[in-house]
Amino acid sequence: MGTVLSRLLLGSIDGQSQQNMSALPNELLLNILTNVSTNDLNRARLVDRRLSRVANSVRNTRAKPRFTLTISSHADNDTLSIRLQRRWRSGGVTEELSTFDMEAFHLMDIDVIEIEGLTERTGSENSIRFLNLAAELSSSLNTVSELRLTNVLFPDSAKAELLKFFKAIVPQCTHVFVRDCLLPVAIPADTIAISNRLRTFKWSHSLAAEGEQEMSEEVIRLVSLKLNLQCTTVELSEAACSSIVGLFQQWMTMAQPTLFSLSLLNRSSEWQSQLLAVCTRAGYRNYQGEFEHPGAGCAHIKVLTGLDSCQLLPVLDVPAKTREMPVVMARWFRDR
């Protein structure tokens, strides 16, 4: 029966054999599909609706539970602890990192990785070594979609382990948050460049000894590539004015302007004035900090300047009225 199923998935059996397969009860098909590989199971879903339903049932039984993995320092004795919490459920299991059984990773998938409140003294470098080892020994980290580093200080000796960790995890992430951290190296630009899923990138109040400027420029370039695809939220501590102007000009040439949110921290008043002056010289109409899209009068880029920060928020004006009301406009923008 396995041979017949394989030929069916390859589309190489005759009509009579297909009729024989369709005559099988769902219970027998379910039993057959539980013995095939994941790749063949995915191909079975494409044969017809009936096989798709049965294959989906098998996939659901194979799915491993998703967890949030948090590594932090114990408040009393500075020992590293790992907390595993089932996604969308309260509660969790906490255990010392040194006694954690790596075999447990084979029984789960990790959705979110959080590292918080660690220093060189409390073992920040050991936490990255632990995660790299987990990535080598199991596939549980292949499902990570969110990375959070908060209030973490890594020593210079952790550079190699950090680079290895970033290159393994960041390309598969949808959301990356780095806040109040001191690192020997930033996320490599070539790692950012191959991030196909990245939608939120926040590197705020953090400093890297190497590579921060290159990382920020690559993030801005990635936003430019994603403008036509989806909303993107970015917060950076370092960014060249020329990169921002390039993103600004690209948005201004879009046939259908889209939404994104870009926040730039630690930008001086001189930097902000330079940005506004360059955009004005490019011929974009500026009214109270809003630059109108030349091809779509209902779209603007709103530039918000502060003491040491600058925000670029595209604004889309859409008609909003009832029969009893005159024409009014509703404003839509992404602010986070």
Image (tube, grey):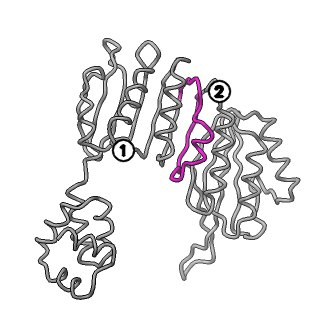
Residue visible at 46% across and 17% down in the picture: 119
Taking the image as shown, residue 252 lies to the left or right of residue 193, namely right
Cα separation, mark 1 vs mark 2, equals 28 Å
Say if 176 sits above or below 60 in the image. Answer: above
Residue visible at 28% across and 81% down in the picture: 13
Question: Residue 203 lies in magenta, yes or no?
Answer: yes
Residue visible at 53% across and 49% down in the picture: 198
Question: Residue 198 lies in magenta, yes or no?
Answer: yes
Taking the image as shown, residue 306 lies to the left or right of residue 88, namely right
Q: Which quadrant holds residue 56?
A: bottom left
* Residue 243 % position (x, y): 74, 46
Residue visible at 80% across and 56% down in the picture: 286
* Residue 26 % position (x, y): 14, 74
- In this figure, which residue is indicated by the disc labeled 1? 111
* Residue 128 % position (x, y): 43, 27
Q: Which quadrant holds residue 203?
A: top right
Amino acid type, label 1? Asp
Say if 327 sits above or below 56 in the image. Answer: below
The N terminus, quarter of image: bottom left
Q: Which residues are magenta?
A: 180-206
- In this figure, which residue is indicated by the disc labeled 2? 210
Amino acid type, label 2? Glu
